[in-house]
Amino acid sequence: MGKRYLCILALFCQSIYSDYYIRPISQPIAGSYNSTALTGLIHLPTADLQPVGTVGVTLGNSSLNKYASIIASPFDWLEASFYYHRPRDSTYIKRGNYLDKGFNIKLVKKFSDISLAIGVDDIAGTGYFSKEYLVGTVHREGFNVTLGLGTGKFSGDHPYKNPLPGLENRPTPLFQSGKSVGSEVDFNAFFKGPIGLFGGIEYAFKDIQGLTLKLESNPFNYQDYMAGGRPSYKSRPARKKEKDFNIGISYRFLNHYNMTLSQIKGNGYDLVFSRSFNLEAKPSKTRAIDVKTYSQAKDNKLAFYQDLLRNLEQEQLYLQSANLSNGDLKLAVVNNKYNNPQDLFTHSHKVAMSLSELRDVKVSHIEITQVVSGLATGTLAAVARHPLNQSKPGKLAISPAQDDTQTHEFQTILKFPEFYSSFKPQFIYRYADPTRFFAGGVDVMLDSEIKFSPSFYATASASYQLVNSFERLRYYPDSPYLPHVRTDVVKYLNNRPDLYLNAFQVDKVTKLKKDHYLKVTAGMFEMMFGGFGAEYYWKPFDQNYSFGLNLYRVKQRDFKQQLGFGDYEAVTGHFNFMYFHQKSGISLDLSAGQYLAEDRGYTFDIARQFRSGAKMGAYFTRTNISKRVYGEGSFDKGFYFKVPLTFFDAEAPRGHSNFMIQPLTRDGGAKLKTHNPLIYSLHGGSKV
C-alpha cells in the first residue's frame, strides 16, 4: 500500500509540469503547523515554513498522546521548535504521567515554486521522535505536493537499505541504551540506518477560504514512535496501525489561528490547535500628538520651555534641560515611553515644532540627548524641517552625548527624593513537572521606586498571593551533588506567606569616562538570592561590540521570602562580550565565569532582533561539572522571546515582556538574576 501510494504521488508531482490545463484555484495555501512541532501536514514535515519573525504555539490531543510546542522562524531559511509530549498508554509514577521533550530544527531553501529542506527532529531528546530527513514541496495554485526520504523513525514500517557507505547501521539512542541521562546530542546517529520514503498532498477548497484537505503517507511504526515510559497492557492494541496513510481537514481562521482534525493510522484521531504571532509585523509608531499651551509666562522663550516640559511629561517623556540659541534647540530627555530612541526624537520634534509656531519661536535645528539613570547616553540631531516635507525633520544624525546638558539655559527643578509606585496583577507559573504539567497563580504586585538622585535609586517589588495551585507540585530536585541554587523553587513557592518580598535593590550608577560605566548594587536581587556587587560596562558609541564585567557576593534567601537568609553563600561573576550585526539583526553574547553553584564555564547566546524591537534567541551553558553531577539534561539550555509591551497595547510604556523556555530546572550553570543589568539598560544608548 505504501509503495503504491508514493508512486501515485510521484506521478502526480510530475504531471504538475505537463501542458494539460489545470483549473486555477483562487487561494494559495499558507503552511500550517503539524502535530510534531513543525510546519507540515499531519505527522509529516513539508519544505515550508512560516513568515520571518513568526512564533507559533500548538496544543494537541490525539488517541496516542497529548502535546504542546512552541515554534519559531527567526529567518526565511530556519525553523526551530521545542515540544512536550505525553503518551496516553504508558506509565511513569502512574499511568499517563510520562513526559518527554525535545528540539527540532529545519533548514529551508526556497525557489520560485519549489522548496527544499533538511531537518533533524528530537535533537538532544530521548529518541522516541528521532528522525532526519530531506524533503521537497512543490507549490501550485490550489495544492502543494510533498515528497521526501528520511532515517530514524521514518523507516519504522517500510525500511530500505541506506545506499551511502558507512551509514547503513543506526546506533541505539543514547537515552534508551542507558549511556545518557537525556538531553544530549548524539551526532553519531544523524542520517544513519535504513531509510524510509514519505509524501503527501494538501489541497485548498476553492469555495471556503482557509479550508484545506491533508493526505499523507504513514511510514511510522507507532509501537515505538510517539511512545515513552513503560508500556501498559493497552499499548500494543492502541498503537496497532490499520492504514498506511493519514487524512485530515485543516481550517485557518482570523489570520493567525489554525485547527486540524485528522484520522491517523486508520483507527485513531489527532486534533491540533495553533496560534501564530508575527514579531516583525508591528514596527513602533508615534501616534498623533495634541499639543497644548500651559505656561502663563510673558517671555516667549520661557513659555516655550515650560510648555515643552508639560507636553512631554504627558507621554512619559521627562524634560531635564533645554537650550534655544539662534534657532538651535537642544533638549535632554528621560525616555520612559519608547524602546527606540528614534521614536523619542520623532515625538519630541513634533511637540517642539508645534509649540514653536504657537509661541512664535524660531527653531531651525533640533538636538535631543537621551538620559538614562541620570547619564547622557547619546544624542540625535537633525534639521528641523526637511526641504521637501516641512512637517518632517531632515536626515537624522546620531552621535555621542557631549555631557553639556548642565550648561543649558533651562533646567528642570528636580525635588528629591522622588517616589513612584504602581499596582498590577502578577501571573506566576511553573511547567513541565511530570505529575502536573502546569501550575500557576495570580498575585497582586506593588512595584515602587525611590530616587535619591538621577543616578541613585532603590526599587522594590512586593506581592500578595490571591490564588494558586502550587501545592500539587512535586518536590524532586534530582541534584544530590550540587547546592540547590535553583531546584528548591517548589519550596519557595509553597513556603512563602501571603505577603512576600519579590525583590529589593539599591543602585548607584556612575559614568567613569566616555563610554565607560559602573554600577554598585545591593539588596534582595531575586526570589532565591540577595547580596551585593558591582557591574562594569564598556560600550564604544560607534562600534557594534561591547564588554561587561560583574561580580557579586550573595547568600541564599530563606523560603519565606522576607528579609531572612539561609546558610548557603557564594561568589559569582561573569565577563561578557557582546556583538551586534546591524544589517541582519543578529546579536551574539558570550559570557564566562563562576555560576551560583560555584561551577565555572561559559554561556553562549545567539538572537535575532527585529525592527519592531522584538527579539528571539537561544542559549546554552557548559561548565566544569560532569553530566552525572548535572543530572538529567546534561547541560543548561533554552530559548526565549523578548516582546515590546506595545506589541500588546499601543499605549504601553517603554519595556519588554520576557518569555523563557527551559526544558529543565537544574542547579548547574545557574546565573544570578538582577533588576535592570547595566549591560542591557545602557546598550540602546549608542549608535550601533
Image (spheres, grey):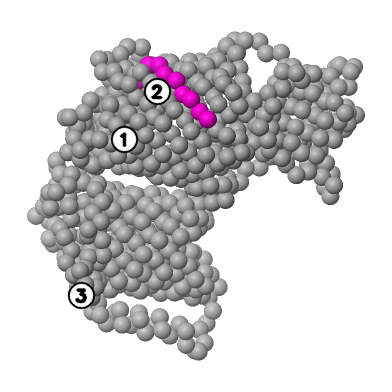
Secondary structure under tag 3 reads loop
* Residue tagged 3: 160
> Magenta segment, which residues?
529-538
Disc 3 crowd rating (10 Å Cα; few below 14, some 14-19, many 20+) is some
In percent of the image, x 35 and y 18: which residue is there? Answer: 553
Q: Is residue 151 left or right of residue 382?
A: left
Front one among 340 and 437 = 340
Q: Is residue 227 above or below residue 349?
A: below
Q: Residue furthest front?
A: 513
Residue picked out by circle 2: 551
- In percent of width and height, residue 560 lies at 31, 16
Please state which amino acid type lies under the numbered disc 3. Tyr
Find the residue positioned furthest to the left.
Answer: 233
Q: Quarter of the image containing the N terminus?
A: bottom left
Locate residue 438 relative to residue 354 in the image: left or right. left
| Numbered badge on residue 601 | 1
Q: Nearer the viewer, mark 1 or mark 3?
A: 1
